[in-house]
Image: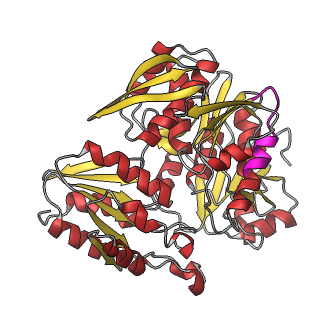
């Protein structure tokens, strides 16, 4: 329950990307904010300290001795957490992160919610930037750092708020998906695939969550649904909200037309209802990102933003950190960072990056680190994800102890399977071995594409500043 009068707020598990953003947002709103987490370290610890937020390392019950008016509980927190137990003992008001976002940030605004297995962060970021360039002063809360704002949240005075809608569960006291807390004015559904094997049993389980989201949308709301996903087509049958398809199908309202990469820019056309809507330029790479842009363009047009303003925003959009982000170049070698971890994301990222670096090899470096990628559920799928890479380096997952032995992913088997497909693939037990190999084998003109949803032991900077010649 969120009380009507609040001055002090405490966040348990505050150092996650989204929870840290919520803490900073609440501080900006004038609340007294404190937090706690296990393993408080940069960059999030520095970010929160710069905001003047007092962070305690660990989950001691004493961290709630000041009896805050509200406790926000992150979804990484278990019921047996000492602070959760103390929260109950003191009978403090508490809520989940999406409940807090809904109460403090949405607060009557028109929510534009971006959902789907892939592309949520880039799509919601681009949509936010288009609204900003149109002078609509949007608010947003997104799971990545927008380079144009150097932030993943914004408190605006306009009518719209852009939210990245996550299907992951909410909290130990609410196992429903986070996006079920939002009431969309408009929404985007980019894709529906199996993911998050730690909370979903199978694809059917995933689909039930998305079905709940769609069926909960008002008849007055609109869903922009990707047109080349059989799971989406099945889910949107007989739903009560307005359905607007986008993609490449001839009968879709919004179509991605012809496009051509001309590094560092991609030129592309958008067709609306069979007629050319506009020609655009973007720094985004790959067809999957152009499809994301198609959905964002569709919503922007629906709320009255002109093609000219959309075009200006697309060309000036600098992207999102950790999404095909060039971290630097050294001796003619490009080091790129990307968040890809699901097999589809790995495949599409490699396919997108390859044409932009035609004069060298694409060296794909992959760390299976998520709760899903460390499980064998995609063991036989991953070999097909690297077909367009010239060289492949697979690091052994560093947290396999979190997965039952019978369910563990094998990076060794992945390399064997890649070699059977004729690929130049190598397996490494630690990050140091990966760095040593790359320093020895990378050449001028190559791009080293590093894919992980974690920090990967700061491999990017270590490659760029290493004294040995690459």
Q: Residue 448, position in %: x, y? A: 27, 57
User: Which residue is more in the foreground, 239 or 154?
Assistant: 239
Give the residue at x 69% y 40%: 31
Say which quadrant the C terminus sits in: bottom left
User: Which residue is more in the foreground, 467 or 379?
Assistant: 379
Q: Residue 158, position in %: x, y? A: 65, 21
| Position of 460 relative to 358 (above/below) | below
Give the residue at x 88% y 60%: 91
User: Which residue is more in the foreground, 6 or 470?
Assistant: 470
Give the residue at x 36% y 46%: 352
Give the residue at x 31% y 69%: 393
Q: Residue 36, position in %: x, y? A: 63, 61
User: Which residue is more in the foreground, 140 or 365?
Assistant: 365
Q: State the scheme by which the image is colored.
A: secondary structure
Does any portion of residue 330 appear in the rendered image? yes
| Position of 273 relative to 377 (above/below) | above
Residue extent of the magenta highlight: 210-221
Q: Quadrant of residue 226?
A: top right
């Amino acid at each position: 329950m969120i009380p009507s009068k609040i001055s002090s707020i405490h966040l348990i598990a505050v150092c996650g990307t989204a929870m840290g953003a919520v803490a900073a947002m609440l501080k900006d709103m004038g609340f007294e904010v404190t937090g706690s987490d296990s393993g408080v370290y940069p960059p999030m610890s520095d970010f929160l300290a710069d905001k003047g937020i007092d962070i305690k390392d660990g989950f001691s019950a004493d961290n709630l001795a000041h009896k805050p008016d509200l406790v926000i509980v992150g979804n990484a927190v278990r019921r047996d957490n000492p602070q959760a137990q103390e929260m109950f003992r003191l009978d403090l008001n508490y809520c989940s992160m999406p409940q807090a976002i809904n109460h403090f940030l949405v607060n009557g605004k028109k929510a534009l919610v971006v959902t789907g297995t892939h592309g949520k962060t880039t799509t919601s970021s681009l949509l936010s930037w288009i609204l900003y360039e149109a002078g609509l002063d949007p608010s947003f809360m997104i799971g990545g750092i927008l380079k144009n704002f150097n932030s993943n949240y914004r408190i605006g005075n306009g009518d719209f708020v852009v939210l990245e809608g996550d299907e992951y569960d909410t909290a130990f006291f609410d196992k429903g998906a986070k996006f079920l807390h939002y009431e969309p004015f408009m929404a985007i559904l980019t894709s529906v695939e199996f993911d998050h094997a730690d909370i979903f049993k199978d694809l059917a389980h995933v689909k039930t969550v998305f079905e709940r989201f769609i069926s909960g949308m008002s008849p007055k709301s609109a869903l922009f649904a990707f047109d080349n996903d059989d799971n989406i087509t099945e889910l949107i049958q007989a739903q009560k909200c307005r359905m607007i398809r986008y993609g490449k199908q001839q009968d879709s309202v919004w179509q991605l037309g012809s496009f051509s990469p001309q590094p560092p820019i991609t030129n592309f056309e958008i067709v609306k209802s069979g007629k050319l809507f506009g020609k655009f330029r973007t720094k985004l790479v790959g067809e999957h990102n152009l499809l994301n842009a198609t959905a964002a363009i569709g919503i922007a047009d629906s709320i009255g933003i002109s093609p000219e303003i959309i075009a200006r925003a697309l060309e000036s959009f600098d992207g999102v950190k950790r999404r095909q982000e060039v971290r630097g170049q050294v001796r003619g070698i490009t080091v790129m960072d990307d968040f890809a971890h699901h097999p589809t994301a790995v495949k599409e990222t490699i396919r997108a990056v390859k044409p932009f670096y035609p004069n060298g090899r694409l060296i794909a470096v992959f760390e299976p680190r998520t709760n899903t990628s460390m499980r064998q559920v995609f063991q036989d799928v991953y070999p097909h994800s690297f077909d367009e890479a010239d060289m492949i380096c697979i690091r052994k997952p560093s947290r396999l102890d979190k997965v039952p032995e019978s369910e563990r992913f094998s990076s060794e088997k992945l390399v064997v399977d890649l070699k059977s497909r004729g690929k130049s693939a190598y397996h490494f037990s630690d990050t140091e071995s990966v760095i040593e190999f790359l320093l020895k084998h990378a050449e001028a003109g190559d791009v080293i594409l590093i894919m992980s949803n974690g920090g990967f032991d700061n491999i990017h900077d270590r490659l760029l500043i290493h004294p040995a010649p690459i």
